[in-house]
Image (cartoon, grey):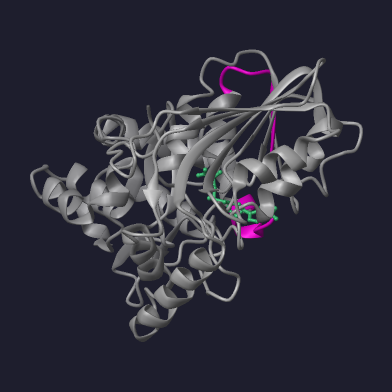
Amino acid sequence: MRYENFQDTLEAFVGELESHGVVDILSGLFPIAPLVSRARMTKMSDRLEEPLRSFIKVFLVGEFISIERFAGTDFELLIPELVRQGILTYDSAELKIGTRGIVLMSVGGLLMFIEKPHYHPTLYYGDESFALLSRLQFFKGKRVLDLCCGPGAQGLSLAATNSHVTLSDVNPLAVALCEINATLNKLGNVDVLHSNVFDSVPKEASFDLIVCNPPLLPCPISVRFPFVGHGGDDGLRVTREVIEGLPEYLADGGSSYISSVLVMGGELDSIEKLRKMVRCSGMSVDVQITAKYRVDVEPGVLQMLAATASATNKNEYERNLEKMRGHFNRASARFLCPAILKLRKSRTTEKVQVADFSDDGTASLMWYL
Ligand SMILES: C[S@@+](CC[C@H](N)C(=O)[O-])C[C@H]1O[C@@H](n2cnc3c(N)ncnc32)[C@H](O)[C@@H]1O
């Protein structure tokens, strides 16, 4: 079977996923389940009958599966096209197929390819991706900009109910995957740009809603940490550039939502930094703090960060942990706090309002109230 174009191939592909029950399984999962429990996904797929079992193993678990398992389905006929388009790949003997390191998820009513969970992700989707999206689903009919879009969780989901969405990312692979996801979901009202923050966004563009889940983890610059998460010494490396561009790109009455991990206390204090950033900018900020983790006396969160930084070289764990402890101790920092920032153009005075919904260090739902 030969399809006219990529759109037709993907449409036929989604039809196959629907008719074999794959979409039902994906949309029944807790939004980030495939990221947290590969073992459970594997066990779950073993309970299914063929060919659903093999679909789930290829597209959710990320395994290579014998092509014979799809014999007699229309999907079998689609395989050469999906290989040609770069979505599937053969094993060396061309007897099995698997994806090129991506898996499928159901996100906000869309099917979306994301990177197969990985210690050093480059095409990120995580728990705060969905937590940010949850706060945006009331927006309808708006012109939206999704900065740092990755595979497109927020921007593409918003495209279904808004007039137009521009998405951008500095990683060309993220841009390519986001374009595939837009086509997979037949979204005609999106543009995907390769851009460092606002650099390639047209100067004359104006948006009602600007969303951003940037690399947000405060981490000393001397620690090698996955690029998608490294927010620099204060966690605001990219956020600062986003906030600086808002007065120019936000329409009157527009708003911006940015996920963040704030440093509380001492020289790195993020609230003080936000106050300085919005001074004379015409912007006001509402900060919703959802959790609080101590970095001074119980550095569990630093152990977690050091483990991520050392995932590919476990020998570096102690050194990374020491660097992190030293970094936050020198700055007299007390907490790291997941938070959602909402920024608006303010006709009165610039201000930063903080609503702290956390209990010290005990939040179980990190990104939710
Ligand atoms: C935490 S991920 C978020 C991805 C996606 N928005 C989500 O929430 O699932 C951060 C993204 O920011 C991108 N990024 C990092 N620095 C950037 C920059 N200076 N300009 C644009 N994008 C950047 C990374 O490539 C990555 O895709």
Which quadrant of the view contains residue 156?
A: top right
- Looking at the image, residue 259 lies above or below residue 353: below
The residue range painted magenta reads: 160-175
Q: Residue 229 in the image: x percent, y percent? A: 52, 57
Confirm whether residue 314 shows in the render. yes
Asked if residue 165 lies in the magenta stretch, the reply is: yes
Q: Nearer the viewer, residue 244 or 124?
A: 244
In magenta segment, residue 172: yes
The residue depicted at 81 percent of the width and 40 percent of the height is 245
Q: Residue 276, percent across and down?
A: 76, 42
142 vs 59, left or right, is right
Left or right position of 191 against 113 = right
| Residue 168 visible, this angle | no
Q: Nearer the viewer, residue 163 or 83?
A: 163
Number of numbered markers:
0
- 315 on left or right of 233: left
Residue 25: which quarter of the image?
top left
Q: Quadrant of the C terminus?
A: top left
Residue 243 vertical placement versus 98 (above, below): above
**x, y percentage for residue 233?**
60, 63
**As displayed, is residue 148 above or below residue 267?**
above
Which residue: 41% across, 48% down?
A: 78
User: In the image shown, does 117 or 138 lie closer to the viewer?
Assistant: 138
Is 265 placed above or below 172 here?
Answer: above
Residue 301 x, y percent position in the rendering? 36, 58
